[in-house]
Amino acid sequence: MVDDDATVRELCAEALEEAGYRVEAFGAGEEALRALPGLDADVLVVDWNLPGLDGVEVARRARALAPALGIVVISGNRWAAAAAAERAGVHHVLGKPFLLEDLVAAVAAAPGATS
């Protein structure tokens, strides 16, 4: 889970953990990419509008590191993120604000998701 907003990151991580997922949370894309090779990650949830590397670039680089990784992008501007996210191999774009149940459903539907 990658989001620079600590509140969003914590709420999303908590909802995913309650749904049975093991969650590693990061505040920056670079930090998540450095950790990814050492994680047994099935799905990446990443905010589109991150400082530094944006979420689509994080998704693209994560895909290069872990080709089978399911990827969900969350964005305040779903339509602007959609085209770029599709080119980066993202499986789902979830517009903010969203229900936590919708996040859990998007993660569950991503390829490779296991709880």
Image (cartoon, rainbow, N blue to C red):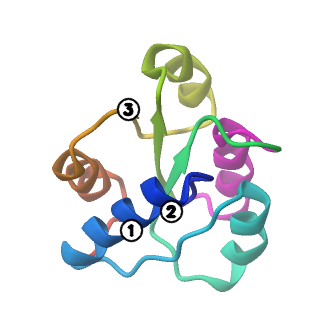
C-alpha distance separating marks 1 and 3: 16 Å
Residue labelled with disc 3: 96
Residue labelled with disc 1: 13
Which mark is first along the chain, 1 or 2?
2
Q: In the rendering, at what x and y percent does residue 104 appear?
A: 24, 56
| Helix, strand or loop under label 3 | loop
User: Relative to residue 57, is residue 56 drawn left or right?
Assistant: left
Q: Which residues are magenta?
A: 53-67
Which mark is first along the chain, 3 or 2?
2
Magenta stretch encompasses residue 59: yes
Q: Residues within 10 Å of mark 1 (few under 14, many from 20)?
A: many
Q: In the rendering, at what x and y percent does residue 115 appear?
A: 25, 77
Residue labelled with disc 2: 1
Q: In the rendering, at what x and y percent does residue 29 appear?
A: 72, 55
| Secondary structure that dominates the magenta span | helix
| Helix, strand or loop under label 2 | loop
Residue type at the position of mark 3: Lys
Q: In the rendering, at what x and y percent does residue 111 appear?
A: 36, 55
Q: Residue at x 52, y 77 (%)?
A: 24
Residue 113 vs residue 75, the one in the foreground = 75
Magenta stretch encompasses residue 38: no
State if disc 1 and disc 2 touch (CB < 8 Å).
yes
Q: Residues within 10 Å of mark 2 (few under 14, many from 20)?
A: many
Q: Residues within 10 Å of mark 3 (few under 14, many from 20)?
A: few
Residue 51, numbered circle: none
How many numbered dots are placed on residues in this image? 3
In the rendered view, tell whether residue 92 sits above or below residue 3: above
